[in-house]
Image: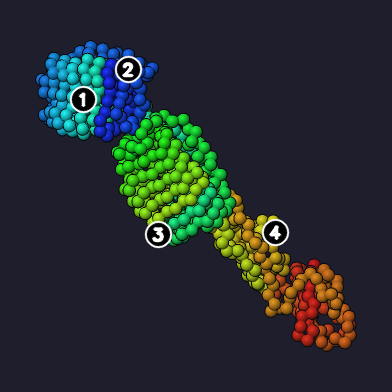
Amino acid sequence: MGTTVDFVLFSSDGAVSNTGITHLTGNVGTNNGSSTGFGNVDGQMHDNDVASGQASADLLLLYGELNAAIPTFFPGSLLGNGVTLVPGVYSIPSAASLNLDLILDGQGDPDALFIFQIDGAFSANANSKVKLINGAQACNVFWKIEGLAEMATGTTMRGTLVVNNSAIIMNVGDTLEGRALAIAGAVTVDGVLAYTPIGCGSPTLTGPIAPALLSTECYGIFSGDGPVSNAGITFVTGDVGTNVGLTTGFDPLNVAGMIHPIPDVSTAACASDLLNVYTYLNTLPFDIELLYPAQFGNNLVLTPHTYVMNGAVSFTDTLFLDAQGNANAVFVIQINGALNTSVYSKVILRNGTQSKNVFWKVDGAVDINDYSIFVGTIVANNGAIDLSTGVTLDGRAMTTTGALSTAAIDADMPLGCSTLYAPNIVSQPVNDTTCVGGPGSFSVVATGTGLTYQWRTGTTNLANGGNIFGATTATLTINAATPGDFVANYNVVVTGSASPSATSVNAELVLCSNSGINSFDNANSSELVTIYPNPFSNSINIVLHDASQIDQAHVTIYNVLGEAIMTTIITSGLTTLETSDLPSGIYIYTVTLNNNTIQTGKLISQ
């Protein structure tokens, strides 16, 4: 077929014209004449150019091959009426007509070929249909016609029509899965649906490469510079925020994501990434120009491509996005102007299209009117976005600069945000009090995705073991506490799947006061007693510096569990205590006077 494979309507020599709202997928053109009256075409227009010249040459070759095919069947001139045909070459040496249903049976062979050689005009009665079963494909059906080809209202034709030396006429409500190609004659259509068939080695449409969304992937509603506000009961999946201004009116109970009431690290990243997304979409080379932005919608069908419209767009009624079975196909619609929709406008996805693969670049304001169903990521530049009452958005609404307002809408961000939230500590650890040998703990509460925890003293990581438990969880437990555990710099580092990590404030493990021990290493500045040697082995000496305190001062020694193991009253200036029975380790002593602790310290038994 050569380059004719890309055309849905074409004449080598004759005008190609349309009246009414016609929807076409494929190129349209003529090599000698003009194409007039067409609205938005999902394809390229080629009139009297290099492409039309090549298509004209290829059409002659195609005609010659179909004309030379050796017939295998010779049916009557009336086709249809529920008759089923098998693959082959069907020769009709006269004019022919189609009535009711003609069934083409591929018999399980996707390469099954059907060629109809009609040596005269061809007409299809109203509401007649060509149906394909058992693997038959429209791309393998060909009609070679030597005369006028006309389809009455409501006809469904399948296959490529190659008409020699005459015109092709399609009427209101006709559907053509194939092509209408005239060698010499006009092609006239009126309110039809016609699209080039897929299969038979036709390329799989993938569309362009989608932009790298980065942090913008995690936002459902966002403005890079402008207030974001809501009125009414709105439901959002995804983050909501702005990088300049305030975010107001959103109920946290109705937002499956984070609300950023004021700019923060996350909104700054999103604003930066959004500019890059816009630049990518704006500079992407387009495949197809939709020539009539004011007629956008109206049941138009688009396939995976990059489209451009050079002007403000009025979107009315329905737009169909057809991925043709490719779930990864990407659609990019570049609008060099503002976008507004009618009430109850709809974007409908067909044949595997996914909302995450649909992108709208808009240079100007966006107004999605009441009760519309909109699909895809909207990236507006220097324009406000208004999502009116009852709008359903399967995608994202984002503007680089401009206010963004919603009113009782339902916005569902497509799945795929892999770094939903960076860690955020919402409840800091607080000081805890315990006795020597008792339990102590610190806890933190954080939000974010994929959180991990690392408790520390200062900058030194703690590890589970000994009396340390939960060093890498949200709660650190110390059981039983030793004198060395009573420090003031316990903190935790919280890390998630998104940066940056978060570090808590410091918290202190405070020694309980019921033993009277408040300090371990530093004696009172005016010591009542001196204890030596320290470290000690078999005995220790207690020297009383103030003789007036004899029989009033008491010395108590505690083990690390906080248990009093030895108490003595100071009865002389020098008191010696036998300690040979004390195991090696750390001990705490206190000196009390009139039931007040006036001195504490640490002793070490060797």
- SS at circle 3: loop
Q: Quadrant of the C terminus?
A: bottom right
Please tell me whether mark 2 or mark 4 is closer to you in this view: 2
Badge 4 density bin: few <14, some 14–19, many ≥20, Cα 10 Å: some
Q: Secondary structure at mark 4?
A: loop
Tell me where residue 585 sits by quadrant. bottom right
The Cα atoms of the two marked residues, 1 and 4, are separated by 85 Å
Name the amino acid, label 4: Gly
Q: Residue 479's spot in the image, x, y percent?
A: 63, 67
Q: What residue sits right under mark 4 in the picture?
A: 458
Q: Residue at x 44, y 45 (%)?
A: 365
Q: Amino acid at mark 2?
A: Asn
Q: Is residue 127 above or below residue 62?
A: below
Residue at point 68%, 75% (across, down): 512
Residue beneath disc 2: 31
Mark closer to the chain start, 1 or 2: 2
Where in the figure is residue 370, as x and y percent of width and height? 35, 51
Q: Measure the C-alpha gap from mark 3 to mark 4.
A: 48 Å
CA gap, disc 3 and disc 2: 57 Å
* Residue 367 x, y percent position in the rendering: 40, 47
Q: Which residue is located at x 77 percent, y 77 percent?
A: 590
**How far apart, in angstroms, are the residues tagged by discs 1 and 3?**
53 Å
In the rendered image, residue 236, in percent from the top left (x then y), is placed at 43, 54
The residue depicted at 79 percent of the width and 79 percent of the height is 598
Asked where in the image residue 188 lies, by quadrant, the reply is top left
Q: Which mark is residue 133?
A: none
Nearer-N-terminus badge (1/3): 1
Residue pointed to by mark 3: 232
When the figure is inspected, residue 443 is found, relative to residue 284, above or below; the finding is below
